[in-house]
Image (cartoon, grey):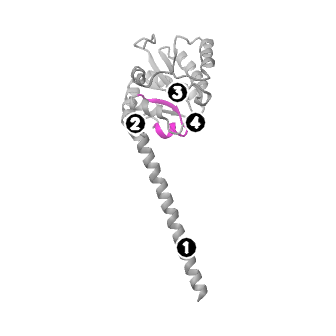
Amino acid sequence: MELGFATSDVVLLFVGRLGPEKNLDFLLRSFTGAVQAYDHLRLVLIGGGPERENLEDWVNRTGNQHAVRFVGPIAYDQMPRYMAMADAFVPASVTEVHPLTVIEAMAAGLPVVGINSPGIGDTVKDGVTGFLVPQEDIAMYTAMMIRMAVDTSSRQRMGQQARLEAPNYAIERTCNMMLERYERVIHGSVGRKQTLRVRVDRFIELFRK
């Protein structure tokens, strides 16, 4: 794994399909502004997809080839090596449900810069395990990238907390929580139905008298 970055560089990592649903044009626009303000910022994108050629063209047109690397798809057992060399995780999607890559990044000790949307907003605690920005606020996302890069102590603190929080979002635990909620709703509905049936039976009995 040779990306050609310096040890002083701050590396932001994205992992996922390079498709429109991942909002990667937003991510690259934000990064373009951030790297202009902090030249030691770097972005690594892992994954393949239909948008790769367009995204690479954007990088070339903005002159940021030195700062962005497209790794392509990798074997899952290689992922920890890339997580270990990164400093933060940067998903830009607003359509996640259970963001597994975010949870895996947190488990690896990476703080997150994400958009406050379902899935991401339910997983990342703003100012605790990363930064959440309002939906589609490119200026704020850019600012949070820069802050993540320059505020080393906060970045490390949030990374440590992210590692501690990650087990709370394990799929087994969240599925059990969801199952318990469904069961409470079902039981509550059954209870209400039984109560209504009792009231109806009493009314019929009174009418018969």
Q: Indicate which label's residue lies in the foreground, 2 or 1.
A: 1
Which quarter of the rendered picture does the N terminus lie within? top left
The residue segment tinted magenta is 110-124
Left or right, residue 189 beside residue 170: right
| Distance of label 4 from label 3 (alpha carbons) | 13 Å
The residue to which callout 3 is attached is 16
Q: Position of residue 43 (x, y in %)?
A: 50, 19
Tag 4's secondary structure? loop
Residue on which the image places disc 4 = 95
Residue 194 appears anywhere in the view: yes
Judged from the image, the secondary structure of the residue bearing numbered disc 1 is: helix
Q: Are marks 2 and 3 in contact (CB under 8 Å)?
A: no
Tell me the residue at 54%/40% (across/down). 118
The x, y position of residue 13, in whole percent, is 48, 23
Residues marked 1 and 3 touching at CB (< 8 Å): no
Nearer to us in this view, 81 or 166: 81
Q: Quadrant of residue 26?
A: top right
